[in-house]
Image: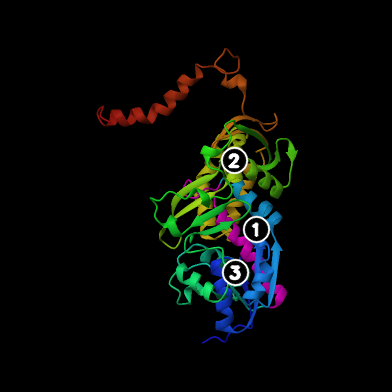
Amino acid sequence: MAPNPKKIVVAYSGGLDTSVMLRWIKEKYGCAIVAYAANVGQGNEELEGLEEKALATGADECYVIDLQDEFASDYIFPMLRAGAVYEGSYLLGTSIARPIIAKGQMDIVRKTGADAVAHGATGKGNDQVRFELTYNAIDPDIRIIAPWREWDFGGRTQLIAYAEAHGIPVPVTAEKPYSMDRNLLHISFEGGVLEDPWTEPPEDMFRLTVSPEKAPDSPAYVEIGFEAGDPVSLDGDFLGPRFLMERLNAVAGENGVGRADLVENRFVGMKSRGVYETPAGTVLHCARRAVESLTLDREVLHLRDSLIPKYAELVYNGFWFAPERAFLQCAIDEAMKAVTGVARVKLYKGSCQVVGRKAPSENNLYRPELATFEEDSVYSQKDAEGFIRLNALRLGVRVRKSGGKR
């Protein structure tokens, strides 16, 4: 049996699971505990008083590290360039946050001389995989403690009771037992009443978006400028990645844009219902594709699109630091060098619609003189006859070989 670790860095959010986990680890292992929280854009409401709460719950030290700028520029934006959407609906807001949180945790391990890490992910979920693949990509010898795979608690109801018995304040109650996870890209909701996929999410659950019914009666228009596949400006104002995300989250959220309700296939093998709010991410996906339609070669665009399911799967499953994700990123970023331009997007009562797009002449592959239905001097319509005949050649051979039968 392995000896107890000397110092454990605990990934701590102040929520139900990690609050109970911190106290439980302290009691079980009796060693020094370092609480670590990553600021990835969850808001001051969740971060305020976090250090005091961690120390009161049993931590010996606490680090709250602001990773918002790095998260936006080095994680969210590369994933957006890839057009990553998991199973056609999920914009991977939780998935993309886990690698940077785990990487920051390993930085604290080095800073404090700890010999173990702990996370509050359940044994049923994807996050345990995402955290631990990242730990192993950085230091395969680090000891990993996952309380949900060790303790005897059967579920969150028992955790709530434990927290109440130990005087640990948590934001989850028996009346609202669903869990929330927020960052710069999105907020997710799981568990509780949402475990019934037939149950409509309660309206008071949402944080980033108003309901489409209560959104303004007049549409809002935003213009998003892109350079090499990255959004760089909003309505003519050039903004850094983090601040662009924050401003666009507010505008899109006010117009009810970005809600998703889906049942997804977890990496561990089960289906799970999740509800998500991703206002800025929804608009940016829509806007980027509009600029791509002008600037990407047809075959490059189609090839990149064929890579999206694999790239999204890698992010969802936790392989952000794997060589195959880096390989795909290099290919995608090469294609994205051409994606420079502006998209105008109409936001109205939950809908997000591109109503205009433009690109500088050196990037723009759209040629009005080729596409026009009016008379032109650059395209001979008679050429289409031979083009069609050559493409139909094999189809005719097949029919004649079968005696005229399809």
Q: Distance between the residues labelled 2 and 3?
A: 32 Å
Percent from the top left, x then y, of residue 393?
39, 28
> Residue 320 — which label?
none
Percent from the top left, x then y, of residue 168?
58, 72
Give the vertical position of 9 relative to 374 (above or below): below
Q: Residue furthest right?
A: 238
Residue tagged 2:
283
Question: Which amino acid, by three-letter code, is at mark 1?
Answer: Glu
Q: Main secondary structure of the magenta part?
A: helix
Residue depicted at 40% across the width and 51% down the height: 199
Residue depicted at 54% across the width and 85% down the height: 2
Give the vertical position of 340 relative to 318 (above or below): above
> Residue 45 — which label?
1
Question: Is 402 a magenta residue?
Answer: no
Query: Which marked residue is nearer to the observer: mark 3 or mark 1?
Result: 1
Residue tagged 3:
135
Pointer 2: residues within 10 angstroms few (<14), some, or many (20+)?
A: many
* Mark 3 or mark 1, earlier in chain: 1
Q: Which range of residues does the magenta coloring cover?
A: 84-113
* Mark 2 or mark 3, earlier in chain: 3
Query: Which marked residue is nearer to the observer: mark 2 or mark 3?
Result: 2
